[in-house]
């Protein structure tokens, strides 16, 4: 036994001398000697050591393992300040960097939340640009007269066919007298409901109420015909001019449509009916006769509540073709006896369709006003919903400026302000309709929600200028007369050329008639001698001359753009991440990498511990060839069996194992410091 121990001691001394010659430090020697000592232990003690080593592996339930994992993540992370926490040797510095990371993370969360909130509000800005040489459609113009009654109305009132304004005023006053007479001699005890007619005698003595108490067919007869537009002229961008006296623009693809208004009665809309004429027209001139003066001495006494609205001249509005003309809200007054020039610049709006403020792209459902169809608009859609609610709940039609009327009034469904025989209504019906409208048919949020604005629509920024029209009646007379003769001659020549030669002789009398009229002008010595037969519209100042022309060829484009787009939001959040903690998309990969390394190391250590237990249980896990060489493996470490000398491979394995033990010891010391 003593000889064996001496031999073993000599072998150990020789091995140590070899380590010293190769420059192996003290840690390597300790690792090698520990392996030798473990080899000398009994089998049961080796098993308990292996189990103890396995229990020291990092796990989620082990605080030491958690610290080690946290340090590993901090060292590997690119987040600003995290490596400082892992590498710093001072607890003060570690707390400082930890406070910095927590504070900057809170700043990042709050700032990013505000940016996302601002994005979800979908705020927009209007970007205005000037597009040169852009063709646009010529707008429509609706003209209303401040004096709505024609010469024909005087005869209708005189023969009693239609109730006159004076008769309407007297009916209101009689209603108020009846209310006062009911109180007999004690007027101080008059009740509130009995005093209502007294108030109505003034409040409802106006054109809008008179309009509702006359049948719809009679309102068109009382007001002006389309011939009130006496003269008109059209110019195209090709240099062509067309003067019409009387004004009839059908041959030039323009329509004149009736629009019935509660205050102005018959209004007329002049608009192009084809895209070609709309794009070619650049100038439209209209000379409008203002009609007869009011007969206040006899039949037009009344309308006391309109004393501040009475005017002379025109009220007009420029709008998109086939759109509802809101004369009351967007109209302009035109002075009588003057030439008014309206130079417009087309403006195209392109709204942003957002979830907060959606809009309609393309065409929407049209609507009707007294049988005339109009294209969709948000304002009229909202008012139409109020109108339908009044018709359903109250059984009457609201007759206010700007409110479309989906049907023509009649005895079954009349205007809400009716109390005369025109629609078989009484004053009690009028009060009932009025109370129903005020109490039950008020605009609500439900009426506004379904009606959206259009995403694309046009407006016309107009600059108005007024001057004296220097023309005379005889000039207007000869220009219109001679132009009509020339156009008649052109039509006759076109008809002649389109007929066979044997049928052309039938046009000879018409050619002779045109020839006489043309020669009458060409041979006239004094053109002013026709002053008596000419129309006295111009020099009497009983006209309004309106010129509508395009200011230039440019188009103003107003486009809504979102203040904070999705790209801008991502850029803001990215800038905040970089400004605060340096968070980048690479952090996602780093987290995946950390879990991969952690789980891989955990699985490897677990397998190593299990292998150590199995090897110890099998007598050191030494094979036949290894036993002959005197070398065994313990886990991942090389173990020299008794009676063997270390080889170069054994020394390399021992050195590697020593490095691993040193690294593990340093990491353990760093974790214990935290």
Image (cartoon, rainbow, N blue to C red):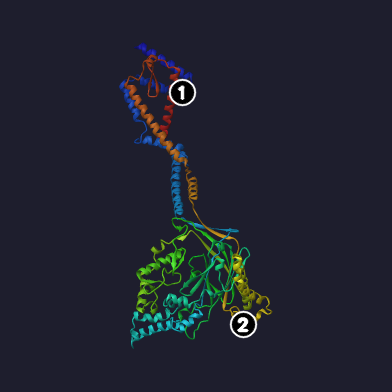
Left or right of 357, for residue 494 = right
In this view, the residue farthest toward the bottom is 185
Residue position marked by numbered label 2 in the rendering: 532
Q: Quadrant of residue 422?
A: bottom left
Residue 486 percent location from the top left of the image = 63, 71
The disc placed on residue 25 is: 1
Task: Judge depth for marks 1 and 2 and give the one in front.
Answer: 2
Dot 1 or dot 2, earlier in sequence: 1
Inter-mark Cα distance, 1 to 2: 135 Å
Left or right of 554, for residue 450 = left
Q: Callout 1: helix, strand or loop?
A: loop
Residue at image position (54%, 67%) is: 254
Residue 618 percent location from the top left of the image = 32, 20
Does residue 415 appear in the picture of this structure? no
Q: Nearer the viewer, residue 334 or 363?
A: 363
Above or below, 644 against 302 in this view is: above
Q: Nearer the viewer, residue 122 or 486?
A: 486
Residue 1 percent location from the top left of the image = 34, 12
Does residue 250 appear in the picture of this structure? yes
The C terminus lies in quadrant = top left
Residue at image position (49%, 52%) is: 565
Residue 139 percent location from the top left of the image = 54, 65
Q: Callout 2: helix, strand or loop?
A: loop
């Amino acid at each position: 036994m003593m000889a064996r121990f001496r031999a073993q001691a000599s072998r150990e001394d020789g091995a140590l001398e070899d380590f010293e010659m190769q420059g192996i430090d003290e840690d390597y020697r300790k690792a090698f000697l520990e392996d030798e000592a473990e080899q000398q232990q009994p089998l049961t003690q080796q098993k308990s050591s292996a189990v103890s080593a396995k229990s020291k592996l990092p796990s989620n339930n082990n605080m030491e393992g958690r610290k080690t994992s946290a340090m590993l993540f901090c060292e590997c992370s690119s987040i600003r300040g995290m490596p400082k926490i892992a590498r710093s040797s001072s607890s003060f510095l570690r707390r400082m960097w930890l406070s910095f990371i927590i504070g900057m993370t809170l700043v990042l969360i709050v700032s990013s939340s505000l940016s996302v909130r601002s994005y979800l509000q979908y705020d927009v800005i209007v970007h205005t640009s000037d597009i040169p040489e852009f063709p646009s459609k010529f707008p429509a113009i609706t003209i209303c007269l401040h004096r709505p009654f024609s010469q024909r109305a005087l005869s209708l009132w005189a023969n009693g066919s239609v109730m006159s304004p004076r008769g309407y005023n007297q009916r209101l006053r009689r209603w108020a007298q009846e209310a006062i007479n009911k109180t007999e001699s004690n007027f101080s005890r008059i009740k509130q409901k009995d005093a209502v007619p007294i108030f109505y005698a003034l409040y409802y003595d106006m054109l809008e109420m008179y309009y509702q108490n006359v049948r719809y067919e009679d309102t068109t007869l009382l007001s002006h015909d389309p011939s009130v537009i006496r003269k008109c002229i059209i110019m195209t961008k090709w240099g062509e001019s067309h003067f019409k006296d009387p004004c009839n623009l059908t041959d030039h693809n323009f329509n004149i449509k009736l629009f019935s208004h509660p205050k102005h009665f018959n209004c007329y809309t002049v608009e192009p009916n084809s895209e070609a004429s709309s794009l070619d027209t650049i100038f439209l001139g209209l000379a409008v006769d203002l009609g007869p003066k009011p007969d206040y001495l006899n039949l037009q006494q009344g309308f006391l509540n309109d004393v501040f609205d009475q005017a002379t001249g025109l009220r007009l509005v420029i709008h998109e073709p086939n759109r509802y003309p809101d004369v009351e809200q967007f109209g302009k007054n035109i002075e009588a006896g003057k030439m008014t020039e309206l130079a417009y610049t087309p403006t195209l709006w392109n709204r942003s369709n957002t979830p907060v403020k959606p809009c309609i792209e393309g065409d929407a459902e049209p609507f009707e006003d007294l049988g005339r169809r109009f294209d969709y608009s948000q304002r009229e859609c909202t008012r139409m919903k109020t109108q339908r609610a009044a018709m359903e709940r109250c059984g009457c039609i609201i007759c206010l400026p700007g409110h479309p009327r989906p049907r023509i009034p009649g005895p079954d469904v009349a205007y809400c302000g009716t109390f005369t025989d025109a629609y078989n209504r009484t004053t009690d019906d009028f009060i009932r309709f009025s109370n129903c409208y005020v109490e039950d048919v008020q605009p609500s949020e439900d009426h506004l929600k379904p009606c959206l604005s259009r995403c694309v629509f046009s407006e016309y920024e107009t600059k108005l200028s007024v001057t004296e029209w220097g023309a005379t009646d005889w000039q207007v007379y000869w220009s219109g007369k001679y132009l009509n003769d020339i156009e008649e001659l052109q039509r006759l020549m076109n008809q002649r050329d389109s007929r066979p030669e044997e049928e052309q002789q039938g046009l000879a009398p018409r050619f002779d008639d045109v020839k006489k009229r043309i020669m009458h002008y060409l041979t006239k010595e004094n053109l002013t001698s026709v002053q008596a037969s000419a129309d006295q519209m111009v020099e009497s100042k009983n006209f309004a001359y309106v010129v509508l022309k395009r200011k230039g060829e440019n188009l103003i484009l107003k486009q809504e753009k979102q203040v904070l787009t999705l790209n801008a939001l991502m850029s803001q959040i990215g800038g905040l991440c970089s400004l605060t903690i340096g968070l980048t998309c690479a952090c996602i990969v780093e987290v995946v990498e950390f879990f991969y390394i952690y789980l891989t190391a955990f699985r490897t250590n677990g397998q190593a511990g299990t292998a150590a237990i199995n090897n110890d249980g099998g007598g050191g896990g030494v094979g036949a060839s290894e036993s002959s060489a005197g070398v065994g493996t313990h886990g991942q470490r090389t173990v020299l069996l008794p009676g063997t000398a270390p080889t170069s491979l054994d020394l390399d394995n021992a050195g590697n194992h020593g490095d691993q033990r040193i690294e593990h010891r340093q990491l353990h010391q760093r974790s214990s410091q935290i």
